[in-house]
Image (cartoon, grey):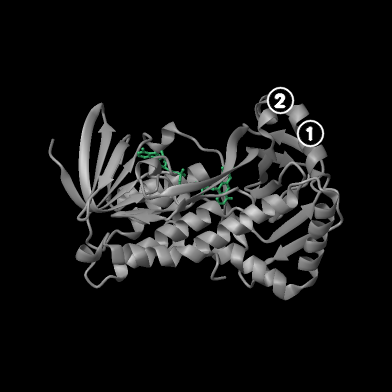
Amino acid sequence: MTTKCYDVVIIGGGPVGMALVIALQKCGLSTLLLEARGLPEEDEDPRPLALSHGSRLILERLNVWNKLSAPTPISTIHISNQGSLGRTMITTEDAGVPSLGYVVNYHNLFNTMYTIVQEVRADYIAGAKVTSLETCIEHGQVDFEYENKNKQVTAKLLVLADGGRLTAQIKDIDYVVHEYEQWAIVANITTEMPQSGIAYERFTPDGPVAMLPSGDHFALVWTVSPDIAQTVIAMDESVFLTKLHDHFGDRLGKFIKAGKRTGFPLSLKYATPNTSQRIALVGNAAQTLHPVAGQGFNLGLRDAWELANVILASSDMATAIGTPAMLSRFRKKRQIDSHAGRIFTDSLVKFFSNDNILLRNASGMGLCALDNIPPLKRFVARRMIFGARG
Ligand SMILES: Cc1cc2nc3c(=O)[nH]c(=O)nc-3n(C[C@H](O)[C@H](O)[C@H](O)COP(=O)(O)OP(=O)(O)OC[C@H]3O[C@@H](n4cnc5c(N)ncnc54)[C@H](O)[C@@H]3O)c2cc1C
């Protein structure tokens, strides 16, 4: 078996892995992206992604933004708490940005990035499933299956952007895992009142429910307990719409139509540390968050962006790449942002998703306080948009 050697091999061509390979083009390094799935048409992922304004700025620099088909801008975020009086609205003026975020579809983002990866002529192999990896001081080695054959490559740096599926093979990286015992049901919803740029996040004892503006309808992310998830997915459409309306309330009038429903089990999972010998973790491989407040991809994109910056900032890239010094710089750069993202989303879920009357009153008061203290609102809004650095 002939083994080709690269500077960087990225395992996992989801949006984060593709962002990294695009960011590393034109720097003269040899890169290879290995993706287990086939071509994008074969796999459709319906989840909506709320991209922050900070992510827009990164995607603009990667030349991805201008090719995305019609992201829907979010002008206001409306946050409420079922069964208590507190509610708050965060607007573009509060945050000092032209838009609080933009809603795109995962599949749409995936396809756009895939086209760009082809255009920049990055080495990309679709249908390449990595089966094992190991490293020594000088390099990392990857074995993968492609067209029923076993292949092997080596690189000075291996980047895991595979959502965390292969991390168990790295002996000095552990995952901290917390199962939320919740599923997210996603579907497109047509409502009586048209969407007007407002994203609704409603907290309930069962978990949050979000209605995000998306084109001329809403993209629903509804958290339910695992034992009813399949029932909710299989429900007759009119029963589903009635249950959703009862749960969400009447802010948008009647719920008229629901598109295809899909469910995702939810957990918090993060790697400690996020690097190992000749290995860096990015995106969901580094941290998988609850979708409340739409932070996961935004954080993962910043992982990819910072890793590219750390690589490109080295005066002697080809020698420095994958060294302990380079990996330590990356680890330090991502520590605070990743930690803050995890704490923020996890606290939102735990604080708001419970039926303890005292906590529910406290969370209602918290929303009132947020609504009435503009500097606090600006602080929260900017951290949601730009990460820990605000
Ligand atoms: C319901 C829901 C709603 C969400 N909403 C938002 C939101 O509004 N905003 C936001 O920022 N985030 C959101 N997220 C989180 C977001 O979807 C993820 O953070 C993001 O998709 C992570 O991207 P990734 O590229 O790291 O991983 P993934 O998207 O999981 O991609 C990993 C890739 O690696 C490939 N792979 C896996 N194993 C191998 C292997 N052995 N060999 C080769 N390739 C492999 C997979 O095929 C896949 O393509 C949401 C998540 C869910 C579930």
Judge by depth and name the residue closer to the eye, 365 or 198: 365
In the figure, is residue 83 to the left or right of 307?
right
Q: Residue at x 54, y 71 (%)?
A: 389
Label number found at residue 360: none
Judge by depth and name the residue closer to the eye, 292 or 169: 169
Could you say where residue 11 lies in the image, as x and y percent from the top left?
34, 45
In the figure, is residue 306 to the left or right of 145?
right
Quadrant location of the C terminus in the rendered image: bottom right
Instruction: Look at mark 1 in the image and give the residue it sits on.
Output: 243
Q: Residue at x 37, y 61 (%)?
A: 307
Could you say where residue 339 lies in the image, as x and y percent from the top left?
54, 60
Q: Are marks 1 and 2 in contact (CB under 8 Å)?
A: yes
Label 1 neighbour load within 10 Å: few <14, some 14-19, many 20+ = some
Report whether residue 61 is seen.
Answer: no
Label 1 CB sits under 8 Å from any ligand 1 atom: no
The part of the image, by quadrant, that contains residue 278 is bottom left
Judge by depth and name the residue closer to the eye, 85 or 189: 85
**Residue type, label 2:** Met
Report whether residue 178 is seen.
Answer: yes
Could you say where residue 268 lies in the image, as x and y percent from the top left?
56, 47
Could you say where residue 190 lies in the image, as x and y percent from the top left?
71, 40
In the figure, is residue 191 to the left or right of 145?
right
The disc, 1 or 2, on the residue closer to the chain's N-terminal end is: 2
Label 2 neighbour load within 10 Å: few <14, some 14-19, many 20+ = few
Quadrant location of the N terminus in the rendered image: top left
**Residue type, label 1:** Lys
The outermost residue toward the left is 2
Label number found at residue 235: 2
Local secondary structure at mark 2: loop
Q: Residue at x 47, y 63 (%)?
A: 335
In the figure, is residue 194 to the left or right of 306?
right
The part of the image, by quadrant, that contains residue 2 is top left
